[in-house]
Image (cartoon, rainbow, N blue to C red):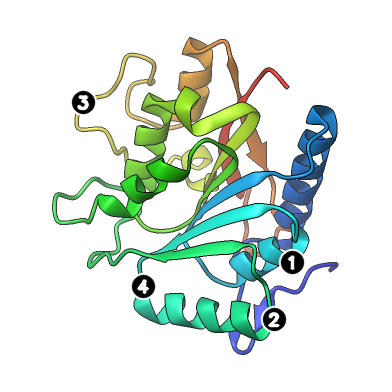
Amino acid sequence: MKYTTRIDKEFCQISPVAMEWIEMFVKELKHRRKRKKAKILEFGAGVSTITLAEMFPNDEIVSIEEKEKWYEMVKGWLKEKKLKNVNLIFEKVKIRNFYVFDEMTNTNYFHIAEQYRPFDLIINDGNMREYIGVNILEDIDNWLTEGGLYLRHDYEKAMMNTWIGPFPKAPEWISSGGGLYYDGFCAAHPGYELLTIGGNGIWGYKAEFGGVWRKGA
């Protein structure tokens, strides 16, 4: 594949196929806007952070990580490779929480990103994925630029009906029981469209990413 997906003994859980699609999207977005720089937010640092930094050397990347070991490794990789376009932020979270809301989780892991918004691309691939996804959707006009894209990793779980519903009280636009709730959001918000990105099949993904694209650019 075109992109390096391994550093030392660590590997990137985002497939090269998806990363290639993300590269094409960002380049096309900048071309349409006649802009030199894009602004990218990543929840969950790792090998993907290095890939993004090398893929978009002239763009601004904000990456937030909650595991100190990963944070230190990524910081070391960035220094070793002399990559200076990543604002790497450490915000500790004690509990691994991907699919449910949890009162013990550090909500600042998400809210620390508010000071940097809006973004052209948001990748939700770290802790608190449900909390992050719901809070972004509730205020999405302030999180995404026109033409921008929000993506949540592991969206194939929703397609296989194994996604645990995150809502203590479901919003009006969600279908009963959860499921493809980005689709429900877009159905109730005409300014947005559901977008899914397939992986390379190695991980068995039907749709590695799912999220919403904001129309207008």
For this view, does 111 lie left or right of residue 213? left
CA distance separating discs 3 and 4: 30 Å
Q: In the image, residue 15 lies at what x, y percent? A: 69, 61
Residue at the image position 46 percent from the left and 27 percent from the top = 142
Which amino acid lies under the numbered mark 1 shown in the image of this protein?
Glu
Which residue is label 1 attached to? 54
Asked whether 154 or 6 is in front, the reply is 6
From this viewpoint, is residue 213 visible?
yes
Which residue is label 4 attached to? 67
Q: In the image, residue 137 lies at what x, y percent? A: 42, 28
CA distance separating discs 1 and 2: 9 Å
Which residue is label 2 attached to? 81
Residue 42, relative to residue 151: is it above or below? below
User: How dense is the environment of label 2, judged by Cα within 10 Å: few (below 14), some, or many (20 and up)?
Assistant: few
Which amino acid lies under the numbered mark 3 shown in the image of this protein?
Lys
Earlier along the polypeptide chain: callout 3 or callout 4? 4
User: How dense is the environment of label 3, judged by Cα within 10 Å: few (below 14), some, or many (20 and up)?
Assistant: few
CA distance separating discs 1 and 3: 41 Å
Which residue is label 3 attached to? 169
Residue 139, relative to residue 29: is it above or below? above
Secondary structure type for disc 2: loop
For this view, does 67 lie left or right of residue 51? left
Secondary structure type for disc 4: loop
User: How dense is the environment of label 4, judged by Cα within 10 Å: few (below 14), some, or many (20 and up)?
Assistant: some
For this view, does 119 lie left or right of residue 135? right
